[in-house]
Amino acid sequence: MNVQEIMQQMTLEEKAAFCSGYDFWHTKAIERLGVPAVMMCDGPHGLRKQEGVGDHLGINKSIETVCYPTAAALASSFDRDVMRKLGEALGQECQAENVAMLLGPGLNIKRSPLCGRNFEYFSEDPYLAGEMGAAYVQALQGQGIAACAKHFACNNQETLRMSGSSNLDERTLREIYLPAFEAVVKKGRTRSLMCAYNAVNGTFCSENKMLLTDILRDEWQSDAFVVTDWGAIKDQAKGVAAGLDLEMPGGPNATGEEIVEAVKAGTLSEADLDKTVLRLLQFVKDSVEQRRPDAKIDREACRHLARELAGECAVLMKNEGGLLPLKEHQKVAFIGEFADKPRYQGAGSSHINVPHAVSALETAGGAVVYARGYDAHSDTTDDALLKEAVAAAKNADVAVIFAGLPDAFETEGADRDHMRLPDNQNELIAAVAAANTNTVVVLHGGSPVELPWLNQAPAVLCMYLGGEQVGAATVDLLYGKVNPSGHLAETWPIRLQDNPSYLNFPGEEGVVTYAEGIFVGYRYYDKKEMPVNFCFGHGLSYTRFEYANLTLDKDSLTDQDTLAVSVDVKNTGSAAGKAAVQLYVRDKDSTVRRPIRELRAFEKVTLQPGESKTVFFTLDKRAFAYWEPKCHDFFVESGEFIIEIGESSRDIRLSRAVQVEGTIELPFTVTVNTTIGQLLKHPKGKEIIGNMMRSSALSHVDQTDSMGEGSERMMQGMMMGIQLGALVSYGRLNRKQLKDLIATLNA
Ligand code: BGC
């Protein structure tokens, strides 16, 4: 297939029609030119392939297959290998099912715990989301299946998701909401992106030239094609002009007449349309060439993988007195409906059709007694169920409660309106914990919840939405067959009100202002030193890890160099386990607002008892930089930075300082409104002002005596705030001198 030749043989009408899908899941074929249709399906924690007539609302069933842990769980593994294994398995399954592209991964940042789709997203941290996403994309595409990174960009809530505008400043966009996409584009080389429904600063993503062309194609150098989210099109011609390629779902009657008209009217250049057509043809060509018609899928092996991955993702949040793992001789009660009918995935377009989800109860078999405890479809306490549960807890050595968010709470299309568990579950946990001090709470759900009973429960194990094998994996973890090694990819605040987006979520009249700026998740909680239930990166193990010998290959570097970091980690406990070594960077003397620390590298390491390994990291400019709107680029401010190694954002074990010198000089335009303080921060300004001060042009009349205590500081403060223009009124310079001074400073 020669895409150039095919494109040249296409009429304007054929090109325009090719920019829309044929139906819900297929591109259009161009039979006369031998271009076949290819299929795309939802994912990405399983394959949602609808056979027969596709329908978006899930009325028609998709094929029965395996459901893996959702992204919220996967990110907690802090393990790129987990993502690779998932990407490979799904890639093979897509080959076996003749699917060319699997929609996902979802890379949107968890701005608020209330976002209904948080279970489909990785993290509140863009670096972690980007690394996990890129590892998955590489593995999936390694099997010849295109990934489609979504939803580009700033789709951080479901309320008014199709029509709202996410409004934010340039620095926040670049530091928080784009880097995960950037990583998946640059590192993962994703073959496709899905533009979000919403607008960013008033321009719909499907028509957003800044996102689709200036950033994606020109800056990130991507040749990926962009598909709309299903039905996100507003004006297709405008979209194509902005860099959009494919409208989905379209339909056989979607002829692209807007495109034809725009080309004829000269508002869309045919050259731009050709670029779009070429990108789409390239996608089809690659899919045809990488197709493996003889591929087979072993679903039994996939189920084993789903169980293994769910075990890697779970987070042991709390384990007082070593209550977990459970001991063989203990009498154990499993309490709560989710022990029998686990909650393992969220609702919406990612919903996987699973023949059977494995429960903890069936896995544990006769080893435990069971009490239902609550009705998962209700919020109110059923006294009989409660009584039975308390009795079971009293009779047991350990009570394990299976709690979490019911299905209806977490879905695409709607946000949660509070962060609480249903009342009946909270009441049950409090009552059981009062009856048995050895109470373990196992949590299911795609997002944090408030934990009002936390002080009463000595152990908490979070499974997130762990896929169809979640029950089996839970038993593996509870009994110590698998050692927990997950770490939180998001902060668990105490109350919803503590969340930085609280006052601006979900916005008003279709506009949501990201007023908290870059202070999302731990960047906010840690800066405010706010108590939280569990901080970012937190996760316990049945063993202990010690860190030593943090080494940097240099004491100072410029932002053009890289810094090699190594650290030894040792398993000092008695069980084999996995450490998630987290590297944070702290800008010690920044003059702009920055978070206390930011995750810049991580590695998962397997260690036998007593074993020690050295972990290596390489940091480049981006590890030290912030986005500087003055130069529209990532910028390193010269100064001291601290390299920190920790087990969470609040458990830093080792740190070392390094001097980094920025090599970019910021543009600095002096006007009559520039203050002395601002000038002093600029090398040239500092020199000139220094001279003026010495020559007394700026020395103030000494009034300190008459102005009371602290007047020295006050004069200093006032001086720094004086703008250049005022020097004329103060009689320190005449107009001509002022003009000359400004000209010299700007020269
Ligand atoms: C969702 C996408 C999904 C698409 C196709 C949309 O409503 O936002 O994530 O891939 O539908 O089902």
Image (spheres, rainbow, N blue to C red):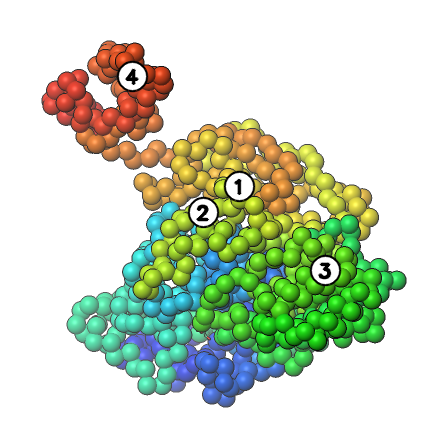
Quarter of the image where one finds residue 426:
bottom right
Q: CA distance from mark 4 to mark 2?
A: 40 Å
Question: What's the distance in space between the residues labelled 1 and 3, CA to CA?
Answer: 30 Å
Q: Residue at x 61, y 46 (%)?
A: 648
| Residue that badge 2 annotates | 519
Q: Mark 3 or mark 4: name the one nearer the start of the chain.
A: 3
Q: Which label sits in the foreground, 4 or 2?
A: 4
Judging from the image, what secondary structure is the residue with disc 2 in? loop
Residue 138 on image: x %, y %: 55, 61
Could you give the CA–CA distance between mark 2 and mark 3, rounded to whole angstroms? 36 Å
Mark 2 and mark 3 lie on one chain; the one further toward the N terminus is 3
Q: Quadrant of the N terminus?
A: bottom left
Where, quadrant-wise, is the C terminus in this rendering?
top left
The residue positioned 43% from the left and 36% from the top of the image is 636
Q: Which mark is residue 529?
A: 1
- Few, some or many C-alpha atoms within 10 Å of disc 1 (few <14, some 14-19, many ≥20)? few
